[in-house]
Image: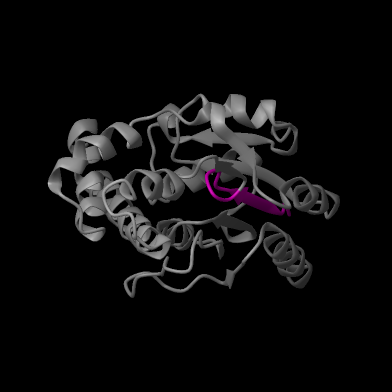
Amino acid sequence: MAKCALFDIDNTLLLKKPTIVEKVFELARQRRPSLPLEEVEKAYAASELWQGAQIRKENETGVRMSDEEYLQNVAAIYQQGLGLDPGVCEEFRALFGRKYAEEYQIAPGVPEGLARIREAGICMGVVSNNHSGVRKALEDLGLAGFFRCVVISEEVGLYKPDPEILRYACRQLGAPCENSVYVGDHPFDVLCAHSAGMPAIWMPVNRFMEIPGSISAPEYTARSFGEAADFLGQFFSEKL
């Protein structure tokens, strides 16, 4: 039976440089010169949880929030969390509306980890809430050849945490969900995996990111891509 590992892109395989946290910190320090970086990390975690919950709501209702309203909500989370004047929201909206594809870098340990996973006979795919342009980043950075399928939400009209996007990828790979593992940085990646009937490896992007009580704990929490690769090898060897 096929063994399958599916991966998120942002903060799992690739990193955006500069990161959102770095850019927000740079902008916010112009308003609050003594602002600690950890406050921005906390605001980032709060923003990501809101975004996951919002996409889940949109999946359930079939009603998508406009991009402008979406960005306004995200900007307000940062503005309020950092204790800044509401006037900064316009600057935040401009920042979050940027395109980052050209600024991607490979996350530490990814090429070596993917090579080990492939050598273990585990087929691999990508599942990401993203736009089509991210395919070029995977190709330009030399990672595309590792994956037998790349499923992008914008292309298939499915968005995590809807488990159907993972089921779709598993069908492309000919692997049942119960014999697959999803690796991602977001708490709602864990929810998506469990809803699809597959284990999850969670790679939290910072120390303030937490799994809400409404989401069951991941099977493994990895602090690096190498740790995730180690767990995948162990998981599939135990299933044999």
Report the quarter where the N terminus lies.
Answer: bottom right
- Is residue 11 rendered magenta in the image? yes
Q: Residue furthest front?
A: 33
Residue placed most toward the observer, 72 or 33: 33
Query: Residue 195 lies in what quarter of the image?
Result: bottom left
Q: What's the image's color scheme? A: one colour
Residue positioned 75% across, 69% down in the render: 234
Q: Residue furthest right?
A: 119
Give the residues drawn in magenta, as a range. Answer: 1-12
- Say whether residue 235 is left or right of residue 47: right
Residue positioned 51% across, 59% down in the render: 205
Q: Position of residue 236 (x, y in %)?
A: 74, 64
Q: Main secondary structure of the magenta part?
A: loop
Report the quarter where the C terminus lies.
Answer: bottom right
Q: Position of residue 169 (x, y in %)?
A: 55, 41
For the question of whether residue 160 can be seen, the reply is no
Residue placed most toward the observer, 227 or 173: 227
- Say whether residue 91 is left or right of residue 130: left
For the question of whether residue 93 can be seen, the reply is yes
- Say whether residue 179 is left or right of residue 74: right
Residue positioned 76% across, 53% down in the render: 113
Residue positioned 55% across, 32% down in the render: 103
- Is residue 99 rendered magenta in the image? no
Q: Position of residue 238 (x, y in %)?
A: 75, 72
Q: Position of residue 36 (x, y in %)?
A: 38, 63
- Examine the rendered structure and indicate whether residue 149 appears above or below residue 136: below
Query: Residue 200 lies in what quarter of the image?
Result: bottom right
